[in-house]
Amino acid sequence: MSEPVKFSVRKPETGMTLLDFLAARLNISRRGAKRLLDQRCVFVNGRRVWMANHALAVGDAVEATPEKKQPASRQKSEMRGKKLVTLWEDDDYLVLNKPAGLASNGAGSVENLLVRQEGMETARVAHRLDRDTTGCLLCAKHSDAFGRAVTMFRQGAVKKQYLVIVSGMVRKAEFTITKPLDGRTAVTHLKRLDANDKAGLLLVDLETGRTHQIRRHLAAVGHSVLGEKQYRPGRDVPPQERKVARQMLHAYRLAFPQPFSGETVHCQAPLPRDFLTCLRTFHLNCDKGNL
Protein backbone atom coordinates (compact mmCIF):
# COMPACT_ATOMS: atom_id res chain seq x y z
CA MET A 1 0.00 0.00 0.00
CA SER A 2 1.08 3.59 -0.61
CA GLU A 3 1.28 6.11 2.19
CA PRO A 4 -2.05 7.92 2.78
CA VAL A 5 -2.51 11.38 1.29
CA LYS A 6 -4.64 13.81 3.30
CA PHE A 7 -6.55 16.91 2.17
CA SER A 8 -8.92 19.43 3.72
CA VAL A 9 -11.76 20.68 1.53
CA ARG A 10 -11.45 24.42 0.89
CA LYS A 11 -14.35 26.84 0.57
CA PRO A 12 -14.24 27.06 -3.27
CA GLU A 13 -14.43 23.25 -3.38
CA THR A 14 -17.70 23.07 -1.42
CA GLY A 15 -20.26 20.95 -3.29
CA MET A 16 -17.62 19.32 -5.48
CA THR A 17 -18.08 15.59 -5.98
CA LEU A 18 -15.54 13.30 -4.39
CA LEU A 19 -14.59 11.98 -7.84
CA ASP A 20 -13.75 15.44 -9.19
CA PHE A 21 -12.01 16.43 -5.96
CA LEU A 22 -9.69 13.43 -6.10
CA ALA A 23 -8.93 13.97 -9.76
CA ALA A 24 -8.05 17.62 -9.14
CA ARG A 25 -6.08 17.24 -5.93
CA LEU A 26 -4.18 14.12 -6.98
CA ASN A 27 -3.70 15.39 -10.55
CA ILE A 28 -5.07 12.19 -12.04
CA SER A 29 -7.78 11.40 -14.60
CA ARG A 30 -11.40 10.92 -13.57
CA ARG A 31 -10.99 7.29 -14.57
CA GLY A 32 -8.02 7.03 -12.20
CA ALA A 33 -10.03 8.67 -9.43
CA LYS A 34 -12.89 6.22 -10.03
CA ARG A 35 -10.47 3.32 -9.83
CA LEU A 36 -9.24 4.66 -6.49
CA LEU A 37 -12.82 4.80 -5.18
CA ASP A 38 -13.47 1.28 -6.43
CA GLN A 39 -10.48 0.08 -4.42
CA ARG A 40 -12.31 1.29 -1.26
CA CYS A 41 -9.22 3.30 -0.27
CA VAL A 42 -10.82 6.73 0.28
CA PHE A 43 -12.07 8.11 3.61
CA VAL A 44 -14.11 11.25 4.29
CA ASN A 45 -14.07 12.39 7.91
CA GLY A 46 -12.85 8.95 8.96
CA ARG A 47 -15.51 7.00 7.08
CA ARG A 48 -14.86 4.84 4.05
CA VAL A 49 -16.65 6.34 1.03
CA TRP A 50 -16.70 5.03 -2.55
CA MET A 51 -19.65 6.93 -4.06
CA ALA A 52 -18.27 9.02 -6.90
CA ASN A 53 -20.98 11.69 -6.55
CA HIS A 54 -20.54 12.17 -2.79
CA ALA A 55 -20.78 15.96 -2.26
CA LEU A 56 -18.07 17.53 -0.13
CA ALA A 57 -18.43 20.37 2.38
CA VAL A 58 -15.87 22.92 3.47
CA GLY A 59 -13.57 21.49 6.13
CA ASP A 60 -14.19 17.84 5.20
CA ALA A 61 -11.08 15.73 5.77
CA VAL A 62 -10.35 13.50 2.78
CA GLU A 63 -7.80 10.71 3.01
CA ALA A 64 -6.79 8.52 0.09
CA THR A 65 -4.62 5.44 0.35
CA PRO A 66 -4.21 4.16 -3.21
CA GLU A 67 -2.81 0.74 -3.94
CA LYS A 68 0.41 0.88 -5.90
CA LYS A 69 -0.41 0.16 -9.52
CA GLN A 70 1.98 -2.26 -11.16
CA PRO A 71 2.64 -2.66 -14.88
CA ALA A 72 0.81 -5.58 -16.44
CA SER A 73 4.15 -7.25 -17.22
CA ARG A 74 5.13 -7.17 -13.55
CA GLN A 75 1.73 -8.47 -12.46
CA LYS A 76 2.14 -11.45 -14.82
CA SER A 77 5.66 -12.00 -13.53
CA GLU A 78 4.47 -12.01 -9.93
CA MET A 79 1.69 -14.42 -10.85
CA ARG A 80 4.30 -16.77 -12.30
CA GLY A 81 6.33 -16.40 -9.11
CA LYS A 82 3.54 -17.41 -6.75
CA LYS A 83 4.00 -20.84 -5.23
CA LEU A 84 1.14 -22.84 -3.80
CA VAL A 85 1.94 -24.63 -0.55
CA THR A 86 0.34 -28.03 -0.03
CA LEU A 87 -0.77 -28.88 3.51
CA TRP A 88 -2.03 -32.39 2.72
CA GLU A 89 -2.43 -34.57 -0.37
CA ASP A 90 -3.52 -38.00 -1.57
CA ASP A 91 -4.57 -39.48 -4.91
CA ASP A 92 -7.95 -37.70 -4.93
CA TYR A 93 -7.57 -34.40 -3.07
CA LEU A 94 -5.12 -31.83 -1.85
CA VAL A 95 -5.49 -29.07 0.72
CA LEU A 96 -3.61 -25.89 -0.13
CA ASN A 97 -2.52 -23.00 2.05
CA LYS A 98 -4.09 -20.27 -0.08
CA PRO A 99 -2.24 -16.91 -0.08
CA ALA A 100 -3.97 -13.53 -0.05
CA GLY A 101 -4.60 -11.74 -3.33
CA LEU A 102 -5.45 -14.88 -5.28
CA ALA A 103 -8.93 -15.90 -6.44
CA SER A 104 -10.03 -19.51 -5.93
CA ASN A 105 -11.05 -19.98 -9.54
CA GLY A 106 -11.34 -18.00 -12.75
CA ALA A 107 -8.57 -15.95 -14.39
CA GLY A 108 -5.34 -15.71 -12.40
CA SER A 109 -6.56 -18.17 -9.76
CA VAL A 110 -5.55 -21.14 -7.63
CA GLU A 111 -6.93 -23.44 -10.34
CA ASN A 112 -4.73 -21.75 -12.95
CA LEU A 113 -1.64 -22.23 -10.78
CA LEU A 114 -2.47 -25.89 -10.19
CA VAL A 115 -2.41 -26.41 -13.95
CA ARG A 116 0.77 -24.37 -14.39
CA GLN A 117 2.76 -25.72 -11.44
CA GLU A 118 1.49 -29.26 -11.04
CA GLY A 119 0.09 -30.06 -14.47
CA MET A 120 -3.29 -30.89 -12.90
CA GLU A 121 -5.53 -30.17 -15.86
CA THR A 122 -8.61 -31.65 -14.14
CA ALA A 123 -8.08 -30.11 -10.68
CA ARG A 124 -10.90 -27.91 -9.31
CA VAL A 125 -11.34 -26.09 -6.03
CA ALA A 126 -14.14 -27.76 -4.05
CA HIS A 127 -15.19 -24.54 -2.27
CA ARG A 128 -14.23 -20.90 -2.40
CA LEU A 129 -12.29 -18.52 -0.23
CA ASP A 130 -12.45 -14.78 -0.90
CA ARG A 131 -9.50 -13.34 -2.82
CA ASP A 132 -8.04 -11.77 0.34
CA THR A 133 -8.83 -14.67 2.69
CA THR A 134 -5.93 -17.02 3.44
CA GLY A 135 -5.66 -20.61 4.61
CA CYS A 136 -7.04 -24.10 4.02
CA LEU A 137 -8.55 -24.66 0.57
CA LEU A 138 -9.75 -28.11 -0.50
CA CYS A 139 -9.13 -29.05 -4.15
CA ALA A 140 -10.29 -32.14 -6.04
CA LYS A 141 -7.95 -33.79 -8.52
CA HIS A 142 -10.61 -35.38 -10.74
CA SER A 143 -14.30 -35.03 -11.54
CA ASP A 144 -15.50 -37.90 -9.29
CA ALA A 145 -13.61 -36.43 -6.35
CA PHE A 146 -15.11 -33.02 -7.06
CA GLY A 147 -18.65 -34.42 -7.16
CA ARG A 148 -18.19 -36.19 -3.85
CA ALA A 149 -16.69 -33.08 -2.28
CA VAL A 150 -19.71 -31.02 -3.34
CA THR A 151 -21.93 -33.61 -1.65
CA MET A 152 -19.81 -33.45 1.53
CA PHE A 153 -20.19 -29.70 1.72
CA ARG A 154 -23.93 -29.89 1.03
CA GLN A 155 -24.39 -32.44 3.82
CA GLY A 156 -22.32 -30.43 6.30
CA ALA A 157 -19.64 -33.11 6.60
CA VAL A 158 -16.79 -30.63 6.07
CA LYS A 159 -15.82 -28.73 9.23
CA LYS A 160 -14.18 -25.32 8.85
CA GLN A 161 -12.68 -23.07 11.50
CA TYR A 162 -11.44 -19.55 10.91
CA LEU A 163 -9.39 -17.03 12.85
CA VAL A 164 -10.46 -13.43 12.45
CA ILE A 165 -9.36 -10.07 13.85
CA VAL A 166 -12.26 -7.69 14.41
CA SER A 167 -12.80 -4.08 15.46
CA GLY A 168 -14.04 -2.95 18.86
CA MET A 169 -14.18 -4.52 22.31
CA VAL A 170 -15.61 -8.05 22.17
CA ARG A 171 -17.26 -8.51 25.56
CA LYS A 172 -18.79 -11.99 25.25
CA ALA A 173 -16.54 -15.03 25.68
CA GLU A 174 -18.70 -17.06 23.30
CA PHE A 175 -21.69 -16.11 21.14
CA THR A 176 -23.66 -17.19 18.09
CA ILE A 177 -24.99 -15.04 15.24
CA THR A 178 -28.13 -16.32 13.50
CA LYS A 179 -29.06 -13.39 11.27
CA PRO A 180 -30.48 -14.77 7.95
CA LEU A 181 -28.50 -13.85 4.83
CA ASP A 182 -30.16 -13.46 1.44
CA GLY A 183 -33.33 -14.99 2.87
CA ARG A 184 -31.54 -18.15 4.00
CA THR A 185 -30.59 -19.53 7.42
CA ALA A 186 -27.07 -18.57 8.46
CA VAL A 187 -25.38 -19.62 11.72
CA THR A 188 -21.95 -18.50 12.90
CA HIS A 189 -20.44 -19.60 16.25
CA LEU A 190 -17.68 -17.44 17.75
CA LYS A 191 -15.23 -17.77 20.62
CA ARG A 192 -13.14 -14.87 21.94
CA LEU A 193 -9.46 -15.73 22.17
CA ASP A 194 -8.17 -12.28 23.12
CA ALA A 195 -9.57 -8.75 23.18
CA ASN A 196 -8.96 -5.15 24.19
CA ASP A 197 -10.82 -1.89 23.66
CA LYS A 198 -9.64 -1.58 20.04
CA ALA A 199 -9.80 -5.10 18.58
CA GLY A 200 -10.40 -8.76 19.23
CA LEU A 201 -9.22 -12.15 17.98
CA LEU A 202 -11.99 -14.69 17.43
CA LEU A 203 -12.20 -18.38 16.57
CA VAL A 204 -15.10 -18.99 14.17
CA ASP A 205 -17.06 -22.18 13.52
CA LEU A 206 -19.38 -22.09 10.53
CA GLU A 207 -22.58 -24.09 10.74
CA THR A 208 -23.70 -22.84 7.32
CA GLY A 209 -21.76 -21.52 4.33
CA ARG A 210 -23.39 -18.41 2.90
CA THR A 211 -21.59 -15.88 0.73
CA HIS A 212 -19.27 -13.69 2.86
CA GLN A 213 -21.06 -15.08 5.93
CA ILE A 214 -18.37 -14.28 8.51
CA ARG A 215 -17.77 -10.77 7.20
CA ARG A 216 -21.49 -9.93 6.96
CA HIS A 217 -22.42 -11.43 10.33
CA LEU A 218 -19.62 -9.66 12.19
CA ALA A 219 -20.41 -6.34 10.52
CA ALA A 220 -24.06 -6.77 11.56
CA VAL A 221 -23.12 -6.99 15.27
CA GLY A 222 -20.70 -4.06 15.16
CA HIS A 223 -17.44 -5.98 14.97
CA SER A 224 -16.31 -5.54 11.38
CA VAL A 225 -13.36 -7.63 10.23
CA LEU A 226 -10.23 -5.48 10.24
CA GLY A 227 -9.47 -4.48 6.66
CA GLU A 228 -13.12 -4.95 5.64
CA LYS A 229 -13.95 -2.68 2.70
CA GLN A 230 -17.44 -3.75 1.69
CA TYR A 231 -19.74 -4.27 4.67
CA ARG A 232 -20.81 -1.69 7.27
CA PRO A 233 -19.34 1.11 5.13
CA GLY A 234 -20.73 4.04 7.13
CA ARG A 235 -18.82 3.40 10.35
CA ASP A 236 -15.92 5.53 11.58
CA VAL A 237 -12.64 3.77 10.80
CA PRO A 238 -9.84 4.64 13.27
CA PRO A 239 -6.51 5.65 11.66
CA GLN A 240 -4.77 2.47 12.82
CA GLU A 241 -7.41 0.32 11.12
CA ARG A 242 -7.08 2.22 7.83
CA LYS A 243 -3.57 0.83 7.46
CA VAL A 244 -4.80 -2.77 7.39
CA ALA A 245 -4.45 -3.64 3.71
CA ARG A 246 -6.77 -6.67 3.53
CA GLN A 247 -9.45 -8.36 5.59
CA MET A 248 -7.90 -10.24 8.51
CA LEU A 249 -9.65 -13.56 7.89
CA HIS A 250 -7.79 -16.88 7.88
CA ALA A 251 -9.17 -20.36 7.19
CA TYR A 252 -7.28 -21.98 10.06
CA ARG A 253 -8.56 -25.55 10.14
CA LEU A 254 -10.31 -27.93 7.75
CA ALA A 255 -11.56 -31.45 8.53
CA PHE A 256 -13.47 -33.85 6.30
CA PRO A 257 -14.05 -37.58 5.75
CA GLN A 258 -12.13 -38.76 2.66
CA PRO A 259 -15.05 -40.28 0.71
CA PHE A 260 -12.94 -42.93 -1.06
CA SER A 261 -10.82 -44.21 1.85
CA GLY A 262 -12.99 -43.34 4.85
CA GLU A 263 -10.03 -41.59 6.51
CA THR A 264 -10.80 -38.45 8.51
CA VAL A 265 -8.48 -35.71 7.30
CA HIS A 266 -7.42 -32.82 9.57
CA CYS A 267 -5.49 -29.85 8.19
CA GLN A 268 -4.22 -26.64 9.77
CA ALA A 269 -2.75 -23.60 8.02
CA PRO A 270 -0.09 -21.47 9.77
CA LEU A 271 -0.89 -17.81 10.29
CA PRO A 272 0.41 -15.58 7.47
CA ARG A 273 2.94 -12.87 8.19
CA ASP A 274 0.56 -9.91 7.79
CA PHE A 275 -1.95 -11.55 10.16
CA LEU A 276 0.76 -11.93 12.80
CA THR A 277 1.82 -8.31 12.23
CA CYS A 278 -1.77 -7.17 12.73
CA LEU A 279 -2.00 -9.14 15.99
CA ARG A 280 1.11 -7.38 17.27
CA THR A 281 -0.10 -3.96 16.10
CA PHE A 282 -3.33 -4.33 18.05
CA HIS A 283 -1.64 -6.02 21.05
CA LEU A 284 -3.51 -9.30 20.66
CA ASN A 285 -2.18 -12.71 21.62
CA CYS A 286 -2.94 -15.94 19.78
CA ASP A 287 -2.70 -18.48 22.60
CA LYS A 288 -2.50 -21.88 20.89
CA GLY A 289 -3.78 -23.47 24.09
CA ASN A 290 -7.21 -21.91 23.49
CA LEU A 291 -7.54 -23.21 19.94
Image (spheres, rainbow, N blue to C red):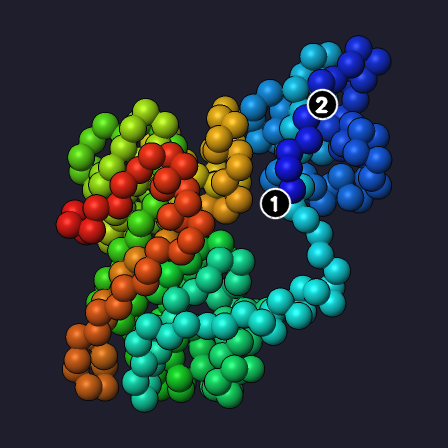
Q: Nearer the viewer, residue 207 or 67?
A: 67
Circle 2 SS class: strand
Quarter of the image for residue 138 reads: bottom left
Q: Amino acid type of disc 2?
A: Phe
Query: Marks 1/2: CA distance?
Result: 18 Å
Q: What is the tally of numbered marks visible in this picture?
A: 2
- The disc label shown at residue 1, or none: 1
For residue 1, above or below residue 158: above
Circle 1 SS class: loop
Q: Nearer the viewer, residue 282 or 119?
A: 282
For residue 36, above or below residue 167: below
Question: Percent position (x, y) of residue 106?
Answer: 56, 69
> Mark 1 or mark 2: which comes first in sequence?
1
Please tell me how crowded label 1 is: few (under 14), some (14-19), or many (20+) other residues with Cα within 10 Å. few
Quadrant in which the N terminus is drawn: top right
Q: Amino acid type of disc 1?
A: Met
Quarter of the image for residue 46 reads: top right
Q: Which residue is pictured at 69% across the width and 12% down the height?
A: 59
Q: Which residue is pictured at 76% across the width and 32% down the height?
A: 22
For residue 225, above or below residue 113: above
**Do tag 1 and tag 2 residues touch (Cβ < 8 Å)?**
no
